[in-house]
Image (cartoon, grey):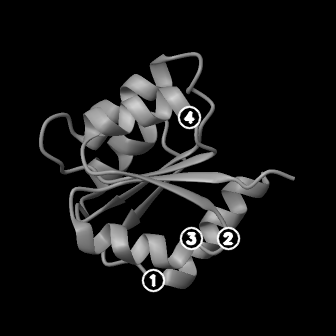
Amino acid sequence: MPERTVLIVDDAETNIDILVDILADDYDVAVAMDGESALEIAFEDLPDLILLDIMMPGIDGYEVCRRLKDNPATTGIPIMFLSALTQEAEKQKGLELGAVDFINKPFAAAEIQAKVIGYLSA
């Protein structure tokens, strides 16, 4: 079975490093540090799952999610928001845009691993 691909989108290198450490042993990991790059990678390589920050320079995670869900080629890719935003309204907005999950930063490695496994085996 081919290796599953997870696209990590975050403008903070520290968060990317942590997520790569958590996931790279089990998945092919792609990385983008802004929304524009994330869209390019997603449309070209069609990852199996996207971990998406919300607050980024340029287009934010909400807009990235909206564009991915509006495109027939990427609409089925599960998106998990990872964000320091903790208000219920922000979570609701992310889920209404089509995300499957919303995890608050700082996150626990075990939670990320379990949720990634769950979404990739669904």
Task: Indicate the amino acid at tag 1.
Answer: Ala
State the separation of the CA atoms marked 4 and 2. Answer: 18 Å
State the separation of the CA atoms marked 4 and 3. Answer: 17 Å
Task: Indicate the amino acid at tag 4.
Answer: Asp
- Dot 1 lies on which element? loop
Residue under numbered circle 1: 108
Residue 17, located in which quarter of the rendered image?
bottom left
State the separation of the CA atoms marked 2 and 1. Answer: 17 Å
State the separation of the CA atoms marked 1 and 3. Answer: 16 Å
Q: Is residue 46 left or right of residue 51?
A: right
Q: Earlier in the sequence, mark 4 or mark 2?
A: 2
Q: Earlier in the sequence, mark 1 or mark 3?
A: 3
Residue under numbered circle 4: 45
Q: Are marks 2 and 3 in contact (CB under 8 Å)?
A: yes
Mark 4 or 1: the one toward you:
4
Q: Relative to 68, does residue 85 appear above or below in the rendering?
A: below
Residue under numbered circle 3: 24
Foreground residue among 47 and 89: 47
Disc 1 packing (10 Å; few <14; some 14–19; many ≥20): few
Q: Are marks 4 and 1 in contact (CB under 8 Å)?
A: no
Q: Point out residue 116 in the picture as x, y percentages from the top left corner.
A: 62, 63
Residue 104, located in which quarter of the rendered image?
bottom left
Residue under numbered circle 2: 26
